[in-house]
Image: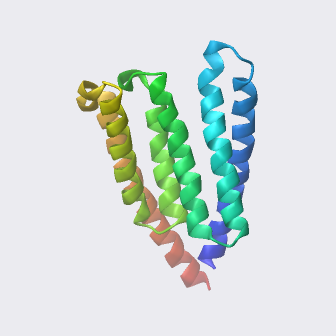
Amino acid sequence: YTQSLREDAFVVLLYSLGGLSLLLLCIGLVGMPVTRLSLYMGIALMLSYWLADKLRNRKNYPAAVCAFLVGIMAALAASFAFYPLDNNPFIFFTPILICASGILLQPRTGFIAATGATLLMGLLALLLGQHDQIWHLPFMAAMLLSYLSATVSMLTSQSFAAAVEWAI
């Protein structure tokens, strides 16, 4: 029963992602240099939505959720080309991604996602010559918040499963 609830929540998140990607894509198509990031993020999110929806329709829920999460992470990674790591506001969206992974998949998946996000962002910072900013407060705070979010999502998911089992 809890898997059915997770799948229903995933469908709502997936359709929300589709709407957001369409909005960002339209804003990005205006063609102004200011909206170029919206275009790149919209493309990444639209591709993620399309792939996750195809996988969900083929009854491959875990792969659909992974495609959903990887697409959002790719959209966040696109922001590294526009903002230096110290001033990038999008790194603080990773805890939302981490919580979603822990709730939509298994309780401990949030820690895997947090580690993957930390490694990806660190690697991007190294590739873009921002390696000295990895040790600054914004990046460290965002990554610490990601691991705290993984802990919260694990405990929430376990408590939710226990409450549903008790109710049934």
Residue 17 located left or right of residue 128? right
Residue 30 vertical placement versus 167 (above, below)? above
> In the picture, which quadrant includes the C terminus?
bottom right
Residue furthest to the front in view is 127
> In the picture, which quadrant includes the N terminus?
bottom right
Q: Residue at x 52, y 66 (%)?
A: 105
Residue 151 located left or right of residue 66? left
Residue 37 located left or right of residue 157? right
- Residue 67: x %, y % from top left: 57, 56
Residue 60 vertical placement versus 27 (above, below)? below
Residue 108 located left or right of residue 163? left
Q: Residue at x 37, y 38 (%)?
A: 121
Foreground residue among 97 and 44: 44
Q: Residue at x 62, y 14 (%)?
A: 33
Regarding residue 125, the answer to whether it shows in the image is: yes
Foreground residue among 117 and 143: 117
Residue 43 vertical placement versus 155 (above, below)? above
Q: How is the image coloured?
A: rainbow
Foreground residue among 9 and 73: 73
- Residue 89: x %, y % from top left: 47, 28
- Residue 158: x %, y % from top left: 46, 71
Q: Residue at x 33, y 31 (%)?
A: 127
Question: How many marks do you count on the picture?
Answer: 0
The image quarter in which residue 9 lies: bottom right
Regarding residue 145, the answer to whether it shows in the image is: no
The image quarter in which residue 120 lies: top left
